[in-house]
Amino acid sequence: MGRRTALFFAPERGDSSRLVGRQVANEGFLKAYMKHGAPGAVPVYAMPADFDRFEAAFPTGRELMQVPASHPRALADCSGLFMPGPALAKRAWHRRGVGRGRYSLSGVTHAMSSERAAEAVRDMLIAPMAEWDALICTSEAIQRLVQKLAGDYADSLGAITGGRPPFLPQLPVIPLGVDTEALASIGPVPGENFRKTHGIGEDTFVLLFLGRLSYHTKAHPIPMYRALNLLTQRLQRPVTLIEAGWYYNSETEAAFDAAARTFAPQVRILKIDARDRTAKDKVLSAADAFISLVDNAQESFGITPVEAMAAGLPAIVSDWDGYRDTVVDGETGFRIPTLMPPSGAGYEYAWRLASEQDDYDLHMGLIAQHVAVDIPKTVEALSALAEQPEKARAMGVAAAARARAVYDWRVIVGAYDALWRELEERRAFYAEEEPHLVPQITDPFATFAGFASGTIAPPFGVRPVDGAEMLLEQLAGSPIAAVDRRSLEDGKALVAGMREQGPMVMEQEFTEQQVAESARTFRALAWLLKMGVIERI
């Protein structure tokens, strides 16, 4: 079997109720890769316990190859490592221990608005990255953002050090994907039943907002509410909005409810928790069109418009970041113009975040508060779909076709495999590089050698003290005697050996390689001396 790119896996811990796009995208990619990835065994880079979790979470008939993250050279036999995020610098330093040309690194952007995401780009400028690495951007806007961040940091580093570092990783644009077949197969029945259950008449125009309901990290609802209320006055027919998603918290839900009462009093709003797949299918089937007027810098791609398109819905979205790539204006839906203040108007907010006067959520909310989405244009787009059902249906058909052609997981996974082949070809042109010291993974007994009076070195001799065996048994019963229990077991063996063969004496100098090969022996000797089980002679 040829060398393959290993998939990094470490299950996320924390509050699973706060579902975010990054989690959905990463899980979707892994499921899709098991189904559509290049033939052959799939290497999974994980800790042993996490590998078991991977097998349980992503059942497949394919062969999985465990690449143990617990071993420093485990990736040396892979062609690459794929990380489900943008932080590649640390992995590049780790790779240096086996040689920079040994394998490629690739990662993917999600929300790039945080300080941590910006630091991930910055750190790649001072890490041993290579031209056979890649940071996959999910939209053209994100690609431009990464290029700007890298350029700004490179300029600053150049001014400080006198040498402007190059940003070496490739920046291909590969969007996120969806299971278009599953979404296209929902059919009309779930929607008909949903409408009947909720008393939605045939003449009612039903809009669907799908996703997180957060005015400070997703989409401020007031422009949407105002546009829908104006639509009811123009149509003279009922309008229902399905808000299908999950609220950031109870305070956010109360704020949405109050805003709806004030700004959309003539619109019926149904609140549905759409984290459940069945509920999600029902609302996708029940709606006449999809709407999402995202205004937040945290939005990097936006998977919900693509899901709606795959389900055959025309989409009305803000002309914002990744939405600009997904919805073809006038063909698969409408993109509503957006406007923000010019460069120079937001430094106060940047400083408030940097000086920790504001937290990240507040910072995102402050930016979004000043991103204007054109309400009159939104009303025009809504009216066009509501008053011309044939046009709406045609747009829905076009939307589904575009989703299949561009965003189906089969297409996306194929693009990933093609990228990894390209990176391997790039790497083949470079001579193999010798392994180097990794500064972040230095031997602690080398790093802190100057702290102690000395190290175990010739001439060196030790022997067991009287009662050493009884002392070892007492130490075995102590929970604090040996953090690494291997030193206890190795120490017992060394004491037994000295009882049979006499004291251990080291007279000849040894190389660092010899020490590394007998590392456990040296550690056990130091531990035995620490606990007074043996003594110097």
Image (cartoon, helix red, strand yellow):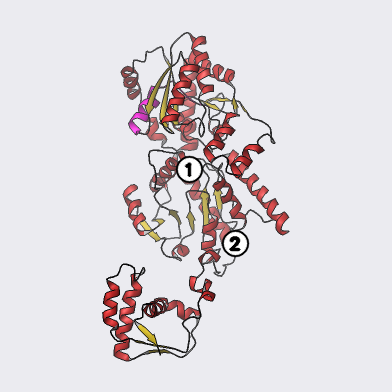
Residue annotated with mark 2: 429
| Circle 1 Cα neighbour tier, 10 Å, few/some/many (<14 / 14–19 / ≥20) | many
Q: Residue at x 57, y 43 (%)?
A: 356
Q: Is residue 321 above or below residue 257?
A: below
User: Image check: 387 left or right of 65?
Assistant: right
Residue 58 seen in the figure: no
Magenta span: 276-293
| Circle 2 Cα neighbour tier, 10 Å, few/some/many (<14 / 14–19 / ≥20) | few
Q: Earlier in the sequence, mark 1 or mark 2?
A: 1
User: Image check: 154 left or right of 95?
Assistant: right
Distance between mark 1 and mark 2 Cα atoms: 27 Å
Give percent across and percent down for residue 518. Answer: 41, 79
Q: Is residue 57 above or below residue 6?
A: above
Q: Are marks 1 and 2 in contact (CB under 8 Å)?
A: no
* Residue at disc 2, secondary structure: loop
Q: Nearer the viewer, residue 372 or 186?
A: 372
Give percent across and percent down for residue 486. Answer: 34, 72
Give percent across and percent down for residue 474. Answer: 27, 75
Q: Quadrant of the N terminus?
A: bottom left
Q: Is residue 44 above or below residue 516?
A: above
Residue annotated with mark 1: 412
The verdict on residue 289 being magenta is yes
Residue 405 seen in the figure: yes
The type of residue carrying mark 2 is: Phe
Give percent across and percent down for residue 534. Answer: 36, 84
The type of residue carrying mark 1 is: Ile
User: Image check: 179 left or right of 320?
Assistant: left
